């Protein structure tokens, strides 16, 4: 039976709004430990999970404490960890790719600083191509390079930006093409060429860029940050507002969210969009978040105080806090989303720059490939997962000095809760 469904539009076409849409709604197939509904509207399938409606603080599965396996004074800000052959890991960091064994042994370093062939300025993503090739995307030089595992440059192509967009954003350069055949393009994200201080937000596009370097095909357009001028400081106009969150998975999968709703939209070649939503209690924005007084108690530099004070006191604040802050693909298709803790009362920019005011752990919600909520897990707030496979989780953690280090959580890292394992046959990311 088809009935009106009130839903939030996905962020795939620049904006989000709540509208009444005529769609077909029916209960999702029964699964142990899960309640919700599945509906269709237009070409989008929506799965809405109701379990649990309001998570308790201790309701999530706490994973083991991360173990630091490798650190170096050379590490700057790793943005990706890519699995390779023979249990190798490729860690993309600045203009280099550190090749590690899973025990923490440094095997070699690929890349060198520069603008010439085989040199990099800012690696935005890497992708292993079996059996022995690594694809590296340099956003500064706009080059896609094929590297041998010994570091030899095999070939490179300069990629063409989408008209009006000139600033590349991080993203694993995965293949895009026909579902049944090899991809002839890779996924690349571009932001607007210049920051605009106006009533409309900036935007970001995700394109399928031909490996020949030809004109890209635009796949999705996402709303990004709206900027404002606070005297001599340029910053986001609102403390909580729509922004483009995205992740690239295998086989051309793209997950996007707007950072406001507890919904993620999954786009896969040849399939209708799948919107996965979680019923989530959104918290009110407290007065503490609108004040920069906390900076007086922190070891902030004069530059940080000037910038943050002007922005915090000049920004607009909504009545309710946003719901999703981060997206990560598991290697087997699950989507991990970091949910905003509605009990926190710290401005997001202060929390991001000063670890001492963050909560001990962040809650991550895991959605399955079919869109259903599967489980919640708690990860230390100083740990950023970058690779989730079937046996372990790898990421970057801040050591006791605040410096980045590569860490892992072994064993249960990718396992959903027993509740979820009953419903999906026991697969794990």
Image: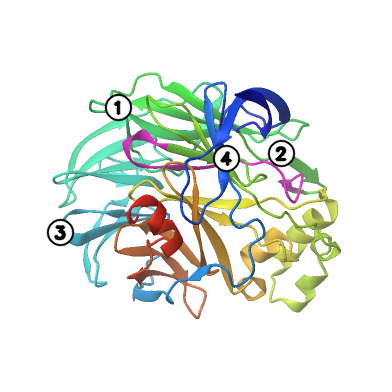
Q: Is mark 3 in CB contact (under 8 Å) with mark 1? A: no
Q: CA distance from mark 3 to mark 1?
A: 27 Å
Q: Position of residue 37 (x, y in %)?
A: 57, 40
Residue in view at x 39 percent, y 57 percent: 422
Q: Which residue is mark 2?
A: 226
Report the front residue among 244 and 95. 244
Q: Position of residue 169 (x, y in %)?
A: 49, 41
Whether residue 78 is visible here, answered yes or no, is no
Dot 2 surroundings within 10 Å: few (below 14), some, or many (20 or more)? many
Q: Which residue is mark 4?
A: 37
Q: CA distance from mark 1 to mark 2?
A: 36 Å
Q: CA distance from mark 3 to mark 2?
A: 45 Å
Q: Which residue is mark 3?
A: 86
**In this rendering, which labeled residue sits more in front, label 4 or label 2?**
4
Dot 4 surroundings within 10 Å: few (below 14), some, or many (20 or more)? some
Name the secondary structure under disc 1: loop
In this rendering, would 401 be left or right of 122?
right
Q: Earlier in the sequence, mark 3 or mark 1?
A: 3
How is colour applied across the structure in the image? rainbow
Q: Is mark 1 in CB contact (under 8 Å) with mark 2? A: no
Name the secondary structure under disc 3: helix
Q: CA distance from mark 1 to mark 4?
A: 28 Å
In this rendering, would 68 be left or right of 48?
left
Q: Quadrant of residue 264?
A: top right
Residue in view at x 27 percent, y 72 percent: 104
Q: Earlier in the sequence, mark 3 or mark 2?
A: 3
Q: Earlier in the sequence, mark 3 or mark 4?
A: 4
Q: Earlier in the sequence, mark 1 or mark 2?
A: 1
Q: Earlier in the sequence, mark 4 or mark 2?
A: 4
The region drawn magenta spans: 234-253
In this rendering, would 105 be left or right of 197?
left
- Number of the label disc, if any, that sits on residue 179: 1
């Amino acid at each position: 039976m088809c009935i009106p469904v009130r839903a939030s539009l996905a962020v795939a076409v620049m904006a989000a709004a709540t509208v009444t849409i005529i769609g077909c709604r029916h209960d999702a197939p029964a699964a142990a430990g899960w309640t919700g509904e599945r509906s269709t509207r237009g070409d989008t399938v929506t799965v809405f999970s109701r379990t649990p409606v309001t998570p308790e603080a201790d309701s999530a599965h706490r994973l083991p404490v991360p173990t630091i396996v490798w650190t170096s004074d050379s590490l700057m800000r790793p943005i990706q960890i890519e699995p390779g052959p023979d249990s190798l890991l490729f860690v993309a960091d600045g203009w280099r790719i550190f090749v590690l064994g899973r025990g923490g042994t440094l095997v070699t370093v690929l890349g060198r600083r520069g603008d010439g062939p085989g040199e990099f300025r800012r690696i935005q993503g890497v992708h292993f191509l079996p059996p022995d090739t690594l694809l590296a995307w340099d956003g500064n030089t706009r080059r896609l390079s094929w590297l041998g595992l010994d570091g030899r440059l095999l070939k490179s192509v300069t990629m063409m930006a989408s008209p009006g967009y000139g600033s590349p954003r991080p993203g694993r350069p995965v293949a895009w093409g026909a579902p049944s055949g090899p991809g002839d393009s890779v996924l690349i994200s571009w932001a607007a060429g210049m920051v605009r201080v106006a009533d409309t937000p900036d935007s970001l596009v995700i394109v399928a860029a031909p490996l020949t370097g030809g004109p890209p095909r635009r796949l999705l357009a996402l709303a990004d940050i709206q900027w404002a001028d606070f005297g001599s400081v340029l910053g986001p106009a609102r403390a909580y507002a729509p922004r483009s969150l995205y992740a690239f998975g295998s086989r051309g999968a793209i997950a996007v969210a707007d950072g406001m709703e507890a919904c993620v939209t999954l786009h896969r070649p040849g399939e209708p969009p799948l919107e996965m939503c979680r019923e989530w209690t959104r918290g009110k924005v407290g007065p503490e978040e609108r004040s920069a007084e906390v900076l007086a108690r922190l070891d902030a530099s004069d530059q940080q105080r000037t910038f943050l004070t002007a922005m915090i006191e000049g920004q607009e604040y909504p009545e309710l806090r946003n719901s999703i802050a981060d997206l990560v693909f598991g290697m087997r298709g699950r989507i991990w989303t970091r949910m905003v803790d509605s009990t926190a009362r710290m401005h997001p920019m202060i929390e991001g720059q000063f670890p001492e005011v963050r909560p001990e752990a962040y809650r991550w919600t895991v959605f399955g490939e079919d869109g259903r909520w599967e489980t919640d897990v708690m990860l230390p707030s100083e740990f950023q997962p970058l690779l989730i496979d079937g046996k372990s989780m790898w990421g970057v953690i801040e050591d006791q000095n605040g410096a980045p280090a590569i860490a892992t959580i072994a064993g249960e890292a990718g396992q959903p809760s027993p509740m979820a394992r009953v419903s999906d046959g026991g697969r794990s990311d």
